[in-house]
């Protein structure tokens, strides 16, 4: 092909999310396959949200509200901020892309952990930025290590809290002490995709209130996890109005679809559903912990809906063998796998098959 492309993307690899259920069914001739690989909510979404989506289907002939007016108002009211301090997006994936497009110049340094959510590095490379990778310390963020990497070229620091895939978290005190040491021209992004699952009180449960002291902070949240809306694609980011205005210039005109907007507004109202999701996750987590303990597996304690666990056998091999048995998990390098916490039936099936494989 003779059409030239941007040099920055020469070595970029296409993003490969886990294998879809249908592919695995076909490949192994299986009737029943469960996926515990993408950290979704096994309950799906709230029934109230489902009803709102069905009712909104009549509106699909016209474009979505390109300004997400009602959703922004709902978020502004919940977080006690102004509407110009929040920006919804089509999942946080889209927001990560848009932030990269708006802020990353060639050769800017973008600091992130190894290991963390892979879109941070992909979008950095896409824009010709330089990823600066800081290894985790005991499976959690090495904040001193990150501070030591800040240079004149640093543009963004990605903090995934709690972290995907390790499930570990940094405390409010650690985070605030860290923010105090960050130069004001460096953007710190707190990706809080799993915040609703956190059990610990010392987690920074309200990072939005930190924005008045740290205008270089962005807080990113999603409806894809505890709210059970991964398939509809909706998330939001809160920050200083100037940063939000900049990102707003770069986003697509109708980036959040009509059903997503309706679903998100309704989801915010259903606290009961969130509680149910949290409780089911906790039950599943405790069950998996006890089974892993019996098997002598190491796992860092998780504050999310997934567990990063050393199964004492090559993760890639375990992944393939589990797939043959109808369970999709995620290999994580070495003997580690990441498993999403499912329904109790799914969790039991996962353990049953895992015992066959290891
Ligand atoms: N951030 C983190 C840490 C994630 O784990 C994920 C999804 N796996 C995302 C962002 C993207 O989520 P979404 O685009 O569905 O909001």
Image (spheres, rainbow, N blue to C red):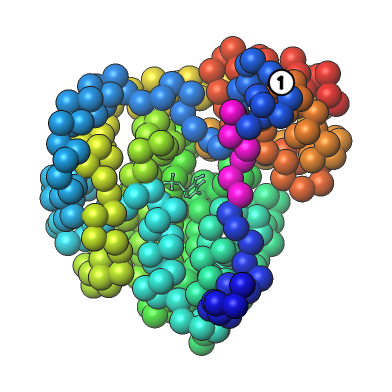
Q: Position of residue 66 (x, y in %)?
A: 18, 55
For this orientation, the residue located farthest to the front is 1
Say which of 242 and 54 sits in front.
54
Q: Position of residue 36 (x, y in %)?
A: 60, 29
Q: Is residue 67 above or below residue 315?
A: below
Residue 17 located left or right of residue 188? right
Residue 243 located left or right of residue 99? left
Say which of 305 and 136 sits in front.
305
Which quadrant of the structure image shows residue 217?
A: bottom left
Say which of 304 and 249 sits in front.
249
Magenta span: helix, strand or loop, mainly? loop
For this orientation, the residue located farthest to the bottom is 152
Residue 184 located left or right of residue 124? left
Q: Which residue is mark 1?
A: 29
281 is within the stretch colored magenta? no
Which quadrant of the structure image shows residue 223?
A: top left
Q: What kind of element bears circle 1?
A: loop
Image label count:
1
Report whether residue 152 is seen: yes
Q: Position of residue 320 (x, y in %)?
A: 78, 33
Q: Quadrant of the N terminus?
A: bottom right
Residue 37 located left or right of residue 218? right
Residue at 28% x, 24% y: name it: 50
Report whether residue 209 is seen: no
Kindly tell me whether mark 1's CB lies below 8 Å from ligand 1: no
Q: Position of residue 123 (x, y in %)?
A: 51, 66
Residue at 23% x, 25% y: name it: 54
Q: Quadrant of the C terminus?
A: top right
Query: For mark 1, does the 10 Å Cα neighbourhood hold few (<14), some (14 to 19), or many (20 or more) residues?
Result: few
Residue at 38% x, 78% y: name it: 184
Start-end of magenta stretch: 16-22
């Amino acid at each position: 092909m003779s059409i030239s492309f941007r040099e920055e993307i020469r070595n970029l690899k296409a993003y490969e999310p886990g294998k879809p259920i249908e592919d695995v069914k076909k490949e192994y001739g299986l009737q029943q396959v469960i996926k515990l690989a993408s950290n979704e909510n096994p309950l799906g979404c709230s029934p109230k949200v489902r009803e709102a989506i069905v009712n909104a289907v009549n509106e699909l002939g016209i474009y979505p509200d390109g300004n997400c007016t009602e959703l922004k108002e709902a978020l502004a009211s919940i977080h006690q901020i102004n509407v110009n301090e929040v920006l919804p997006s089509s999942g946080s994936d889209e927001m990560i892309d848009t932030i990269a497009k708006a802020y990353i110049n060639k050769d800017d340094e973008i600091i992130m952990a190894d290991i963390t959510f892979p879109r941070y590095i992909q979008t950095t490379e896409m824009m010709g930025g330089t990823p600066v990778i800081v290894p985790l310390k005991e499976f959690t963020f090495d904040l001193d290590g990150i501070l030591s990497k800040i240079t004149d070229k640093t543009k963004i620091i990605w903090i995934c809290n709690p972290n995907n895939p390790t499930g570990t978290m940094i405390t409010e005190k650690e985070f605030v002490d860290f923010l105090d040491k960050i130069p004001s021209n460096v953007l710190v992004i707190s990706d809080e995709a799993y915040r609703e699952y956190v059990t610990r009180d010392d987690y920074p449960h309200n990072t939005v209130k930190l924005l008045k002291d740290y205008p270089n902070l962005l807080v990113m949240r999603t409806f894809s996890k505890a709210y059970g809306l991964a398939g509809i694609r909706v998330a939001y980011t809160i920050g200083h109005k100037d940063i939000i205005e900049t990102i707003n210039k770069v986003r697509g005109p109708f980036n959040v679809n009509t059903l997503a907007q309706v679903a998100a507004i309704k989801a915010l109202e259903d606290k009961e559903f969130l509680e149910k999701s949290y409780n089911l996750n906790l039950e599943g987590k405790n069950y998996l912990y006890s089974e892993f303990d019996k098997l002598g597996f190491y796992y860092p304690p998780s504050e999310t809906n997934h567990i990063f666990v050393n199964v004492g056998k090559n993760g890639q091999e375990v992944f393939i063998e589990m797939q043959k048995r109808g369970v999709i998990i995620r290999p994580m390098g070495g003997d580690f796998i990441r498993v999403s916490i499912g329904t109790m039936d799914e969790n039991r099936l996962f353990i049953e098959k895992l015992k066959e494989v290891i």
